[in-house]
């Protein structure tokens, strides 16, 4: 069992928030992501996510990954991360993300992916 439970409402340093559902027996979960900022001028919409938690963690600080399918942009983001619990029981999700946006041609493929890190704490 992991002392770190992914289920619930999280916010990151960019002001985005995400809701993660309960895990099923396989450790998979669903959720939704509401971003405060975007690289597109389209109207921002709540977007679905799906992921997996390595819930076999013996140390209670499991790794996870999830993908957000943006409903308002021609891009997709994959997150990988780990859930950490401090001595007071406060949980933090440390993540690294890749966003791939649709570009017009293979010649533009070099500029299609951005990478970054993001830290989530419970709301
Ligand atoms: C707000 N964000 C956020 O909370 N991140 C962790 C990063 C990685 S996903 C990106 C938002 C992408 C929105 C869709 C698009 O503009 O293509 C940025």
Image (cartoon, rainbow, N blue to C red):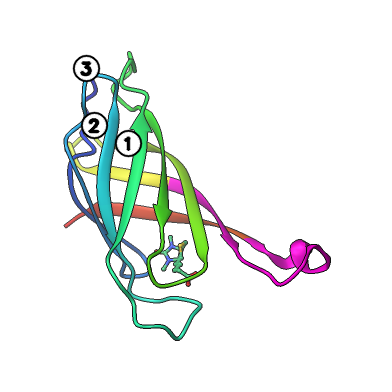
Coordinates of residue 41 in the picture (x, y in percent): 45, 86
If you read the primary sequence from the N terminus, does the residue marked by circle 2 or circle 1 appear first? Answer: 2
Q: Classify mark 2: residues with Cα within 10 Å, few (<14), some (14-19) or many (20+).
A: many
Mark 2 = which residue? 4
Q: Are marks 2 and 1 in contact (CB under 8 Å)?
A: yes
Mark 3 = which residue? 1
**SS at badge 2:** loop
Q: Classify mark 1: residues with Cα within 10 Å, few (<14), some (14-19) or many (20+).
A: some
Coordinates of residue 38 in the picture (x, y in percent): 44, 76
Residue at (27% x, 36% y) in the render = 29
What separation in Å lies between label 2 and label 1 (alpha carbons)? 7 Å
Q: Which residues are magenta?
A: 95-113
Q: Are marks 3 and 1 in contact (CB under 8 Å)?
A: no
Point out which mark residue 84 bears.
Answer: 1
Q: Classify mark 3: residues with Cα within 10 Å, few (<14), some (14-19) or many (20+).
A: few
Q: Which of the two residues, 13 or 29, is positioned nearer the viewer here?
A: 29
Q: For the N terminus, give its image quadrant.
A: top left
**SS at badge 1:** strand
């Amino acid at each position: 069992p992991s002392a770190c439970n992914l289920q619930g409402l999280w916010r990151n340093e960019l002001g985005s928030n995400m809701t993660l559902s309960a895990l099923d027996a396989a450790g998979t979960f669903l959720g939704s992501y509401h971003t405060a900022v975007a690289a597109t001028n389209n109207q921002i919409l709540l977007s679905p996510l799906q992921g997996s938690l390595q819930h076999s963690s013996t140390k209670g600080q499991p790794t996870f990954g999830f993908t957000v399918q943006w409903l308002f942009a021609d891009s997709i983001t994959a997150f990988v991360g780990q859930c950490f619990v401090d001595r007071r029981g406060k949980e933090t999700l440390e993540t690294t993300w890749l966003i791939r946006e649709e570009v017009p041609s293979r010649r533009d493929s070099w500029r299609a992916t951005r990478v970054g890190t993001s830290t989530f704490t419970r709301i």
